[in-house]
Image (tube, grey):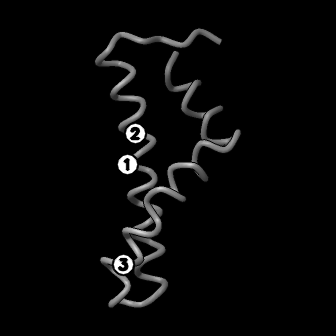
Amino acid sequence: MNSLFIYLFAHVGGTNLIRHVIEPFSMAIFGFGGEQFANVLTNLFTLFGLWYVCYWLYKNRIFVKI
């Protein structure tokens, strides 16, 4: 059930929300490698953020039924 929630969350704007939280930190820390390198890491951290939301929902036994 939560995989469908994460899919919808990502397409409704959740990815942008997580990305805007992560982007300032990843650009400050990994900016030395260039903009493209920092963007790749930002996208990977955003993917990890979405995975963690799904994991957190599962561990707390919160299942969203759509």
Q: Which residue is mark 3?
A: 28
Q: Nearer the viewer, mark 1 or mark 3?
A: 3
**Who comes first in sequence, dot 1 or dot 3?**
3
Q: Amino acid at mark 3?
A: Ala
Frontmost residue, 40 versus 21: 21
Residue located at (36% from left, 78% from top): 28
**Who comes first in sequence, dot 3 or dot 2?**
3
Q: Nearer the viewer, mark 3 or mark 2?
A: 3
Q: Is residue 58 found left or right of 17 in the rendered image?
A: left
Where is residue 51, by image quadrant?
top left
Within 10 Å of the Cα at label 2, are there few (<14), some (14-19), or many (20+) other Cα atoms?
some
Q: Which mark is residue 3?
A: none
Q: Position of residue 52 (x, y in %)?
A: 36, 37
Within 10 Å of the Cα at label 1, are there few (<14), some (14-19), or many (20+) other Cα atoms?
few
Q: Amino acid at mark 1?
A: Phe
Residue located at (70% from left, 39% from top): 12
Task: Give the Cα separation between the discs numbered 2 and 1.
Answer: 5 Å
Provide the secondary structure element on which disc 2 rests: helix
Provide the secondary structure element on which disc 3 rests: helix
The relative height of residue 28 versus residue 61 in the rendered view (above or below) is: below
Q: Which mark is residue 51?
A: 2
Q: Position of residue 60 (x, y in %)?
A: 32, 14
The relative height of residue 65 versus residue 21 in the rendered view (above or below) is: above
For the residues bearing labels 2 and 1, Cβ distance under 8 angstroms = yes
Q: Position of residue 9 (x, y in %)?
A: 61, 34
Q: Position of residue 16 (x, y in %)?
A: 61, 53
Q: Is residue 7 found left or right of 43 in the rendered image?
A: right
Total marks placed = 3
Q: Which residue is mark 1?
A: 48
